[in-house]
Image (tube, rainbow, N blue to C red):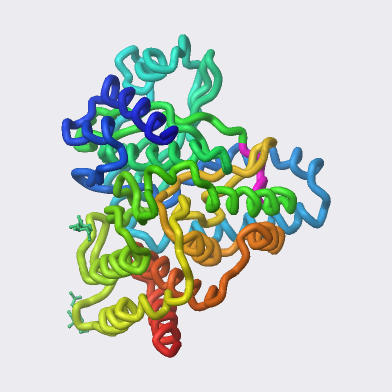
Amino acid sequence: MIFRNVVCIFGALFVAFGGVQAFLLPSVQSCSALSIWPRGVARQNLKCNVIPAQEQQSDHSQSKVQGNLADVIADARAQEEAEKIMKELEDGAVREMGEAQAAGPKYMPSTEPDDPIIMSLQKVLGVGRVEKWELLDSRWNGNEVFKYTTDKGLFFIKLNRVEDPSVFLTEAVGLSALAATNTLPCPKPLHLGKLPKVGDVGPGAFMVLEHLKLLPFGIMRTDMQQRLGEQLAALHLDQTHAALHRGRFGFSVSNFLALTPLNNTWTDDWPSFLARRLESQVAALYQEKQYGRAALNETDMELRILGSRVIRAVPALLAGVKVSPSLIHGDLWIGNAGATEAGPVIFDPACFFGHHEMELAMMTLFGGFRDEFWNAYHARLPKEKGFETRQKLYQFYYYLNQLNLFGDAGVKRTCVRLAEELLLI
Ligand SMILES: *[C@@H]1O[C@H](CO)[C@@H](O)[C@H](O)[C@H]1NC(C)=O
Ligand SMILES: *[C@@H]1O[C@H](CO)[C@@H](O)[C@H](O)[C@H]1NC(C)=O
C-alpha cells in the first residue's frame, strides 16, 4: 500500500511536470496491474554508478583517518578491482553510441529559465537558486550523473540524452518499492522530466534523485559489509508488499537489466517465471540489439541447444525448495552498493519479486562482497538444501545477460560450462 502511494504520488508529479505519454497513465492509477514497455530505444544505464569519482579522490584522506590500515588496503584493492571490472566491461561494449553522441551539438545543463532541469528543481522541488552543477559520472551508454548545488541543498541528476522517460520511470518505481520497505536505503526519486532534442540528439530524459553523501570505499568497510548482510536479509524477508505480489513473481513494471528489457508479467510459480527469463536471454543471443550486433552467429547453435535443455531442466533443478517472493534489487553488483555515514545504500536497481537466492548469484559474479557480508546474511537467511546448484542456475542467467551485452568469448565459455554442469546434476 505504501509502495502504491509512493509510486502514485511520484507518477502524478511525472504527469504534471514531465509530460508523460498517455499510455503511462494507467500505471499511476493502478500500479499493481500493469506492465510498462517503454517505447523507443531502451538504454538503461549499464551501471550508472552514483559513486562520484571526484568525491572519492578528494575525500580519500578522510577515509584513511577513519578506517584501520588493513581495511584501507583491502578497500583500495577492492576498489581497484571494481574499477578494473568496470573498465573492462566498458571497453568491450559498443563504442559507437558514445562517439555518435559526443559529436555535434547536444543538450547541456544551463541556468536558462526554460532549462527543464532548472524548471523542475524550481517548480517541483522549491529550489530558488542553482549555484553550480558538476558531472560526477559518465557512461558509454550515454547516462550521466550530475550533482546540483542549490539553496535547498544537493541533488543528483541522472540524465540520458536519447532515453525515453519511461525507462527512468521503471527505475523510479523500483527505488520507491525499495524505499517503502525501510530496510536498505537507496536514493529516493524526486522527479522525472524530458530533455529537448538538440541538433540530431534527443529527446532525452532526466531523473532528480535525493543526494547521498557517499563515503569513499564506504561499502568495502568491514562494518558496512556486515550491516549490508543484515539489511539485505531484512529486505528479502520484508512483507511490506505482500498485498501487491500476493504470492506471485514479477513486478508492477517491466524494467531493464542494464540494456536488456525484462518481462515482469506476474507469474504464479517461480520455475515458470525463471524459465521465461532464461528463454528470452537465450533468444536474444541471436538477435540484433538497439546497441549492437547479435552476441552469437546463427551458425553457432551450441548455447541455443544447451540453453533449451537447461530450461527444460528448471523444474527438476528447483525441486525440493519452497520459493516465496522477495523484493530483490536485481542487479546488485558491488558498483551498485555504497555507504553513507548512516550505513549501506544501494542504487540502480532492476527490481522484481523473485527468489532471494537470485540476488546472491549476481553478487558473486564480480565479487567485492566479503565474509562479513555472507556470514551476516546467512545468519538471518540460512542456505537451504540445493543452494549451490541453484546458484549455478541463477549465475547462468546473469552470465547470459553479460553475453548479450558484451558478446565476449570468455563469458560464452562460462555460459557453456555452467550449462554443462547443470545438465549433469
Ligand atoms: C511477457 O510474458 C507474458 C507471460 O508469459 C506473455 O504473455 C507476454 O506476451 C510477454 N510479453 C512480452 C512483451 O514478451
Ligand atoms: C557466421 O559464421 C559463418 C562461419 O564462420 C560465416 O561464414 C558468416 O559470415 C557469419 N555470419 C555473420 C552474420 O557474421
Pinpoint residue 224: horizontal percent, then vertical percent: 69, 48
Q: Nearer the viewer, residue 67 or 257?
A: 257
Pinpoint residue 336: horizontal percent, then vertical percent: 52, 49
In the image: residue 81, left or right of residue 8: right
In the image: residue 102, left or right of residue 215: left
Q: Residue furthest top?
A: 128
Above or below, 176 relative to 41 = above
| Location of the N terminus (image quadrant) | top left
User: Is 104 included in the stretch rendered in magenta?
Assistant: no
In the image: residue 144, left or right of residue 334: left
Q: Nearer the viewer, residue 129 or 167?
A: 167
Above or below, 24 relative to 301 = above
Pinpoint residue 193: horizontal percent, then vertical percent: 31, 28
Question: Which residue shows up at 54% across the image and 24% down it?
Answer: 154
Q: Quadrant of residue 174?
A: top left
Image quadrant of ligand 2 equals bottom left
Question: Which residue shows up at 26% across the image and 35% down it?
Answer: 27
Q: Nearer the viewer, residue 214 or 88?
A: 214
One can see residue 65 in this view: yes
State whether the magenta stretch is mostly helix, strand or loop.
loop
Q: Nearer the viewer, residue 212 or 91?
A: 212
Question: Which residue shows up at 77% across the image and 54% down it?
Answer: 71
Question: Which residue shows up at 26% across the image and 83% down it?
Answer: 305
Magenta-tinted stretch: 214-219
